[in-house]
Every structure is written in structure tokens, then in C-alpha cells.
Image (cartoon, rainbow, N blue to C red):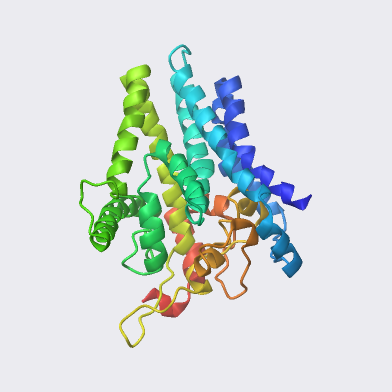
Amino acid sequence: MIDLKYLVAYSIPVSAIIGLSLQGYWSFFTPIFAFVLIPILEILLPLQNKNNSEKERDLKSKSFFFDVLLLLNIPFVYGILGWFLWSLQFNNYTATELIGLIFSVGIVLGSNGINVAHELGHRKSTWQKMAGKFLLLPSLYMHFYIEHNFGHHLNAATKEDPASAKYNQTVYSFWCTSISRQYFSAWKIQGNLLKSRESRFLGIYNDMLWYVIFQSLYLGAIYYFLSLQIMLFAILIAVIGIVLLESINYIEHYGLRRNKIKSGRYERVAEIHSWNSNHILGRIMLYELTRHSDHHYKSHKKYQLLDCHETSPQMPYGYPTSLVLALVPPLWFSIMNKRIPAEMKG
């Protein structure tokens, strides 16, 4: 029964549904819930660093229940997004309500869309990878699949990685560098993949080209069936989801660096190259993403099997709380810089 704890991950979509239903000041319920109430609870609740036993690991690795929990996010994400965009035709939202609901739906896209897509994108089965790409579509971030799997996991915690924040880099600077560099990196990786297959740019194996087509069709459909204004709202919602993802990327590797060995290559990715958090709410709401050290150590390991490594650098707060702190750079630097190993700061 303890595995039902992951149902808490649906609290973000449920909070957005409440905001869409009640409107008014409730339109801001999701951002307040995610970035005020959850951080308070994270600070009050004790850490949980217990790892699975061999028996538990064996049972959880064979259970389809954990995959179902991920896949159920598809109707949640698309249902909430579709509901809001459709309602824009006949609901006379105030400017305040619009702002609150755009942030709410954008947070759903980031937490239950892109984050779940990240987990599914590491799976071995083709249909689960496709489900992950389907969840990336409304965030207009389908290239994330290529850059993350073939770029970030190879270059994490190095200057070559767009998604690894540098020491003393602000989150605002990181949004700009990471978003732009990841997109161009994805095209570069795609080009190399095409060369290795001896495939043409205008061919069926150019996934980046397909992503452009699918995302254009998605926006085109909104424009055709709804309106140009609603299409612009859809883009704004996608931007909120992207910024949430990149804020998480920021805290996952902030200031941590891999050293080069005698051969000129970087040392192997280890548990010390990602920030770990055992704060229970952040763990279950983000499907154990906060056990990021183990995820990079064994990237195909399913979320329910991830372990805590005592050798990993530990965050003083959970990921939701850390996202809030990162928005105030002087405060973030004062808390985190002293936790970074001295040999990595150079």
C-alpha cells in the first residue's frame, strides 16, 4: 500500500482543476500550492533516505502499476490543457484569472508533462518512448528527448553540457543559455545520428524535422479550430512549462563539475555529479527525480527503484523549495556555494 504514495504526484493537476472550476482567486491555487504550501511542508516533514530491499526491488521492477501511474498523466495533461484552451472561447476571464490559470496549466505541463516524459524517454520500449514524446508536444519541447538522452547524459556536469549550471550562474542567465544551446545541440546530435545511418536530412529518420512538423500541426490546429489569440496563449503556457523544467535542470547540477583525466576525457559520471534530495514530498511529486544522482549513475533505472547514495551531494531543501530559493540568486549562492566541493569551483 505504501506505493500509493505516488498518487500525490496528481495533486498538481488536481489543484489546476480546482482553479479552473472555481476561478477567481482560486486561479492562483496551483502556483501557491506548488511553491508556497509544498515548500513549507517539505521543511516540516522529516527526510526519508531509506532504500529498497532486494525483495522490494525485485517486486517493484516487475510491477506494471508504476508505469500506469506515469501513463495516467497523459489524460490529465491534455484534459486540463484542452479544457482551459476551449474555455477561452466563452469564459470572460479577468486579466488576473488569465494570469493565474496560464501559470497553473503551465506548471501542469512542466511537472506532469515534461517530467513524466523524461522518465518515459529513458525506457527501452518504443511505445513508452512515444508516450513520452507525446507528453512533450504541448510544451513545444520535443527536441528535449534527443538532447537529454544523447547529449545531457553524456556531458552532464561539464562545460559542454547546456543543461548543467555553472558556479555562480543565476537561474535567469541559465534559462537563456540552456534553452537556446539545448535546441542547437539537439540539431547537431540529430545531424550526427543521420550521418551514422547514412540518411538524408529530408528523410524519415530525421526526428528533429518530425518534431517541427508535429509541433507546427499542434499550433496550427489550435489556430484553425479556436483562434490566433488562443494559439498565443498555448505558446505562453508552453513557455511556463519549459521555464519550470529548466529551473529544475538548474538545481540538479548547479556548480558540480567532472574533472578531466590524463587521456583528456572527462571522468565517468558518478554519484557526486548531481544534487540529491531525500525530502519526501519532492521525491514522490516528481517521481523520484530528486534522487538524481542515482538516475545519472544508471539512467535506465526506473523511478521506483532509484536509491539514495550517501556520497552524493545533498541539498538542504527539496526540489520545490530549492526552485523558489533559486529565484533569489544572492540567497541561493549563500546556501549552495559552500556545499560545492572546493576542487569543482575552479
Residue drawn at x 36%, y 54% is 146
Is residue 106 visible in the rendered image? The answer is: yes
Left or right of 169 in this view: 336: right
The number of numbered badges drawn on the structure is 0
- Kindly identify the residue that appears in the image at 53 percent across and 72 percent down: 271
The relative height of residue 326 versus residue 54 in the rendered view (above or below) is above
- State the residue at coordinates (47%, 58%): 251
Residue 149 position, x and y percent, is 41, 59
Considering the image in quadrants, where does the C terminus appear?
Answer: bottom left
Q: Is residue 226 shown to the viewer in this render?
A: no
Vertical placement of residue 220 versus 338, above or below: above
7 or 95, nearer to the observer: 7
Q: Residue furthest right?
A: 1
328 versus 13 height, above or below: below
Name the image quarter holding residue 193: bottom left
- Residue 139 spot, x, y in % from top left: 41, 39
Image coordinates of residue 63 in percent, x first then y, are 68, 53
* Above or below, comparing residue 33 to residue 207 in the picture: above
Q: Residue at x 53, y 63 (%)?
A: 295
Query: Of 123 and 231, which appears nearest the observer?
Result: 123
Does residue 315 appear left or right of residue 165 in this picture? right
Rendered image quadrant of residue 191: bottom left
Q: Residue 260: x, y in percent?
A: 35, 81
**Could you say which quadrant of the image residue 32 lies in?**
top right
